Amino acid sequence: MEVIVKELDGKGYAMARENGKRAGMMTYSIAGEALIIVDHTEVEPDFNGKGVGQQMLYKIVDMAREKQIKIIPLCPFAAAMFKRTDNIKDVLKG
């Protein structure tokens, strides 16, 4: 599974692909120099239950750590992941 992160015009996304097929997408808004808001997660039906959402979130968390920014998880999936996963809470906007 390959996950890429791209940004354009105040928005960003992580896209997961496997064998050339889109597996899912997680979108975020750039809310300032030090803050992003994860607002939507979508996983293609063929990839449900395979950890695609988690992989995309981890890629965004890695990007946030590199840029030293914080995340507000508005998306219900991302919010649930932050609640139950201690090792990513360092980038959670508190």
Image (cartoon, rainbow, N blue to C red):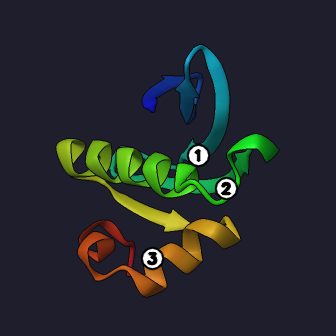
Label 3 CA crowd tier, 10 Å (few <14, some 14–19, many 20+)? many
Which residue is labeled 2 in the image?
Answer: 39
Q: Amino acid at mark 3?
A: Phe
Mark 3 → mark 1, Cα distance in angstroms: 15 Å
Residue at (57, 54) in percent of width and height: 50
Between disc 3 and disc 1, the foreground one is 3
Mark 1 → mark 2, Cα distance in angstroms: 5 Å
Which residue is labeled 3 in the image?
Answer: 82
Locate residue 52 relative to residue 21 in the image: left or right: left
Label 1 CA crowd tier, 10 Å (few <14, some 14–19, many 20+)? many
**Quarter of the picture holding the C terminus:** bottom left
Q: Amino acid at mark 1?
A: Tyr
Spot occupied by residue 45 in the image (x, y as percentages of width and height): 81, 46
Q: Amino acid at mark 2?
A: Asp
Which residue is labeled 1 in the image?
Answer: 28
Locate residue 13 relative to residue 85 in the image: left or right: right
66 versus 65 height, above or below: above
Name the N-terminal-most of marks 3 and 2.
Answer: 2
